[in-house]
Image: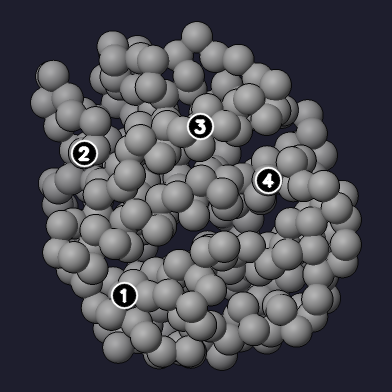
Amino acid sequence: MFAAPQLRVGAPLAHGRLTVFPLHTDFPKPVAYRLAEDALGDGTAVVEEVSEGGTVPHLAVENRGDVQVLFLEGQELRGAKQNRVLNTSVLIAAKVKTVLPVSCVEQGRWRYTSKHFSASDTHSSMTMRKVLKASVSGSARAGRGHSSDQGGVWQEVGRQMSAHGAASPTAAMSDTYAAKYEEVAEHVGGIAYPEGATGLAVAVGGKVVAVDVFDTPETCRKVWARLLSGAAMDALEAAAETPPDDAAVRQAVGAFAAGGWEAVPAAGAGEEYRGEPDGRWHGSVLAVGGAVVHGSLVLAG
């Protein structure tokens, strides 16, 4: 079992209907890895379709480097035959070729725009992550791998597009983000990364909806703005600006230690755990040697 992180909650940071609570913890020995966006950017890692014909729920990944590469749940990859998002957080070992479990977020395209995928600077919303985590957890715990409810993902892409008054010739999630670029950038710019934070609890319209914890401040700093881009999309839909309840934040971050976690086969290197702690969260933890690399909770209700 993984060692539940002992999290300290920092002072809230807010912009509009989005409130973020920085989380701090001390990990004795961080795991060595590079983030996918860095490795994809310099060609150390390459992601492409599994074959010339491709298949929607899987992508081929090759780590050509000497260090593991970390892909995050909800991370969007753009290009090839259609844009995808990661179904779960995955560590790709050095010098390994394997398969990434993904979901399509561009239903109306099945043709090449590039051979390789590139990392997006935006992230799936917390609502989309709930769709992913609920179905992927059920699949992983039933021994069926990291498959998602693809129909549910497409439905959420369409719902979000309609809610934001966006349009897309290929039903691409990225086009909704492009339509709301200025508003999202304003939210992200209004909540700067606080030095030393290793995680964040996100509240939208006064309700805590997600928690993400990483093993180093450096990782949290690098993914901070991208994670907030997804949270901002939810905040733009929220109807209220009620301040979040401190007790709800403490309950959320304490859910990692609530028990009920089940080990499942990891999609890559390391160990993976799934659970519904406190009966209120869809949770997953990617760990190495029991040390958390990425732990995340998304509100189930």
Residue tagged by mark 1? 273
Residue tagged by mark 4? 234
Q: Do the residues labelled 1 and 2 touch (CB within 8 Å)?
A: no
**Residue 149 image offset from top left, x and y in percent:** 33, 44
| Tag 1 secondary structure | strand
Amino acid under disc 1: Tyr
Distance from disc 4 to disc 1, alpha carbons, whole Å, reads 26 Å
Please name which of the two marks, 3 or 1, marks the residue nearer to the observer: 3
Question: In terms of depth relative to the viewer, which is nearer, 19 or 38?
Answer: 19
Amino acid under disc 4: Asp
Instruction: Note whether 219 is above or below 46 in the view shown.
Output: below
Disc with the residue nearer the chain's start (4 vs 2): 2
| Tag 3 secondary structure | helix
The answer to whether residue 271 is seen in the rendering is no
Residue tagged by mark 3? 157
Residue tagged by mark 2? 58
Disc with the residue nearer the chain's start (1 vs 2): 2
Distance from disc 3 to disc 2, alpha carbons, whole Å, reads 19 Å
Disc with the residue nearer the chain's start (3 vs 1): 3
